[in-house]
Image (cartoon, rainbow, N blue to C red):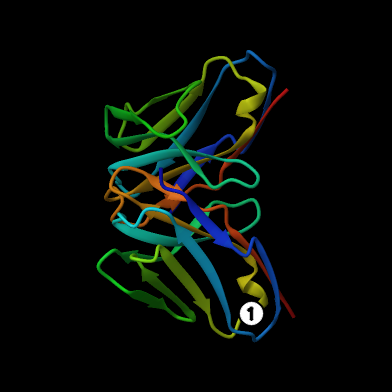
Amino acid sequence: KQEVTQIPAALSVPEGENLVLNCSFTDSAIYNLQWFRQDPGKGLTSLLLIQSSQREQTSGRLNASLDKSSGRSTLYIAASQPGDSATYLCAVWDGQNFVFGPGTRLSVLP
Amino acid sequence: NAGVTQTPKFRVLKTGQSMTLLCAQDMNHEYMYWYRQDPGMGLRLIHYSVGEGTTAKGEVPDGYNVSRLKKQNFLLGLESAAPSQTSVYFCASSYGQGYQPQHFGDGTRLSIL
């Protein structure tokens, strides 16, 4: 059974820092991996989707990488801002099911 | 553009009561999903639909039923609510299953006393 974990569970950084969030999955037989952002009391917003044939995707200050063979993905946030404070979740699609990680709660301090 | 709309936003039920959660999307998406989110756990798929009139079970379907009578609507029913069903419920939709980003509603916070 596919399991997705995220480290760290929570992270607090000063404004302006570059940071990396980690996502690991146990079964490398995935079709894609998505990174989502969730604000308190809100639903999830898709940030980046990486197909299994891709190595990375970029959107603005966000860069996500995927290493299927090692079962890892990272989300890199450049020049963090207080508005980046949220919970970040990753999810893998294995062709039948979406499996989500528990999330990393990010606080960017002004 | 409303996207995905869930009603109600909050609800408190007593054990044994029934209720229906409504999800509506205006993006003409074929695929719709119901998830539950519990503290410390990732989202878990309850049921999903690949098109009007079709439904399928997800990871945690027990105690729930669904219906997709219209393409834009996906209903989640609890026939006899139990305290273990206290959770935040999210509906999502997507153009394609798995290969396209999912669009989420803002959730329904449900407490079963």
Camera-nearest residue between B53 and B88: B88
Total of numbered circles in the picture?
A: 1
Q: Is residue B44 above or below residue A14?
A: above
Q: Chain of mark 1?
A: A
Image side of residue B75 versus residue A84, left or right: left
Assign a secondary structure to mark 1: loop
Camera-nearest residue between A81 and A63: A63
Image side of residue B90 versus residue B82, left or right: left
Q: In the image, residue B47 lies at what x, y percent?
A: 40, 32
Which quadrant: the C terminus of chain B? Answer: top right
Which quadrant: the N terminus of chain B? Answer: bottom left
Can I make out residue A36 in this image?
yes
> Circle 1 is placed at which residue position?
A81
Identity of the residue drawn at 39% across and 78% down: A58
Can I make out residue B3 in this image?
no
Q: In the image, residue A84 lies at what x, y percent?
A: 61, 72
Q: Is residue B98 above or below residue A110?
A: above
Identity of the residue drawn at 58% across and 34% down: B8
Identity of the residue drawn at 67% across and 24% down: B83
Camera-nearest residue between A61 and B74: A61
Q: How dense is the environment of label 1, judged by Cα within 10 Å: few (below 14), some, or many (20 and up)?
A: some
Q: In the image, residue A34 lies at what x, y percent?
A: 41, 61
Hey, which quadrant is residue B11 in on the image? top right
Q: Amino acid at mark 1?
A: Gln
Q: In the image, residue A49 lies at what x, y percent?
A: 36, 64
